[in-house]
Amino acid sequence: MAEVLERTPDLDIDPYDDAFIADPYPGYASMRSAGPAFYMPKYACWGMARYKEVRPALLDWKTYGSGMGVGYTHFGKEKPWRPPSLLLETDPPLHDRTRRVVDRVVFPPALQRLREPFAKEATAAVERVVAQGRFDGVKELAEAFPLKVFPDAVGLDVDGRENLLPYGDMVFNGFGPLNARFKASTATASTVVPWIMAKCSRAALAPDGLGAEIYKAVEAGEATEEEAAMLVRSFLSAGLDTTVAAIGSALYLLATNPGEWRKFRADPSLAKNVFEETLRMESPIQNLFRTTTREVELDGLHIPVSEKVLLLLASANRDPEHWQEPDRFDITRRVQGHVGFGVGAHVCIGQVIARMEGELLLTALAQRVASIGLAGPPIRRFNNAVRGFASLPLDVRAA
Ligand code: HEM
């Protein structure tokens, strides 16, 4: 059977190269035109970049497993750099059990109590930058706001929160090959990692936060104490860099698309859609791996069992076969179906929290800012998986 199948086409492309990361979109177009799947000799792994294949692969956890890691490292062949996540890097049945524990904590009605404190902080954060006029959109909004509301919601005390972003940077770099970029981000690992693990313990968490809610599963006999700590770690790993990147990209897109900004100003209720369109245009998690659990045949192409496949979510979200004018930022677009939060068994478990942050911060912006523009060249953040800015100089005028 296998010998009648064609070999997947080779593509001499490096998605971890600085130039690629600076502007990945031409690279994604080449990947999509290579066919349903392609092979990257440099990394000896496969890739899928078209919506038509990426979405079904995300849905098919039986064929494209997560248990061997959702990064480049194949857990069956190499030791992971940190103990694997009990959510992200597992398959059913273990995944079903851990997911149930966390699903209860992030059940949307249970999260409504976060709206008021998030809205209050969003208003305060926007008022602070409006008073300044010129500011760094990354440091002073995209980081400042989630860095306050998210650890508060989890139930972390205020000491040492500066460790959260370096930890996230390390985790997301760790989804790529363990290259120089990853190694540089582990420079502070000896202080950051023990700090994170200490904050995941029951004793470190406020009794009314989401972290303490996870520990209720221990009393209910649904998880061990160690598992609960690891599930809190999932929140601290995935919950911050992603929203920081999304908010930074939303600010950039609004500042550089004055027509869309005017529409948004006229109707701040578009905030939710502005956030979704941002996730489509500049997907915070650009790519994730899966590992084939069996030999795959795809339109006559052949991927052997136990191979790493890079799923390019960001490319699927800009696929012209699926989206009209995919490179245009359109805040009134029907954006349902984007894969910025993934889809299927592993779909983002923090999406309600992320959307709440995005909606409330952008609403506060549209209500209080008359104009927004770049005050200098933005500086890109280089990470193996996350797309965002390191710095975004902005000018705003009060409404
Ligand atoms: C805009 C912000 C966010 C984006 C773009 C995002 C994106 C994603 C994506 C693409 C996945 C799927 C991973 C996969 O299929 O392998 C995912 C899973 C996950 N996300 Fe998010 N995320 C965001 C915010 C958050 C927040 C705020 C939290 C924490 C509360 C969070 C926690 C998680 C966890 C724990 C998983 C693993 C779920 C599982 O494997 O069952 N994320 N996220």
Image (tube, rainbow, N blue to C red):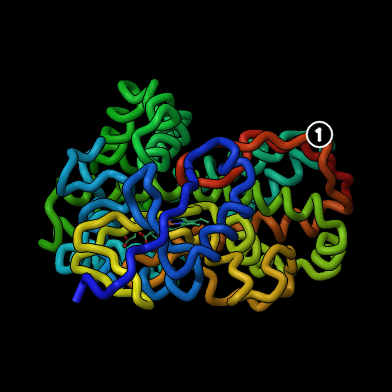
Q: Quadrant of residue 111?
A: bottom left
Q: Is residue 326 visible?
A: yes
In the image shown, does 174 or 42 lie closer to the viewer?
42
Instruction: Report whether 365 appears left or right of 98.
Output: right
Residue drawn at the location 84% of the way across and 67% of the way down = 263
Where 151 sits versus 286, above or below?
Answer: above
Q: Nearer the viewer, residue 99 or 187?
A: 187
**Position of the N terminus by quadrant:** bottom left
User: Is label 1 in a helix, a strand or a loop?
Assistant: loop
Q: How busy is the neighbourhood of tag 1: few (under 14 within 10 Å), some, or many (20 plus)?
A: few
The residue pinned by badge 1 equals 376
Q: Position of residue 273 (x, y in %)?
A: 66, 69
Whether label 1 lies within 8 Å of ligand 1 gets the answer no
Q: Is residue 118 left or right of residue 384?
A: right
Does residue 236 appear anywhere in the picture?
A: no
The residue sitting at 56% across, 61% down in the picture is 356
Location of residue 259 in the rendering, given as x and y in whole percent from the top left corner:
87, 62
**Amino acid type of disc 1?**
Gly
Query: Hey, which residue is sitting farthest front in the picture?
Result: 4
Using the image as rendered, state which of residue 386 and residue 25 is in the foreground.
Answer: 25
Residue 199: x and y in percent read 31, 36
Q: Is residue 222 left or right of residue 191?
A: left
Depth check, front residue: 62 or 12: 12
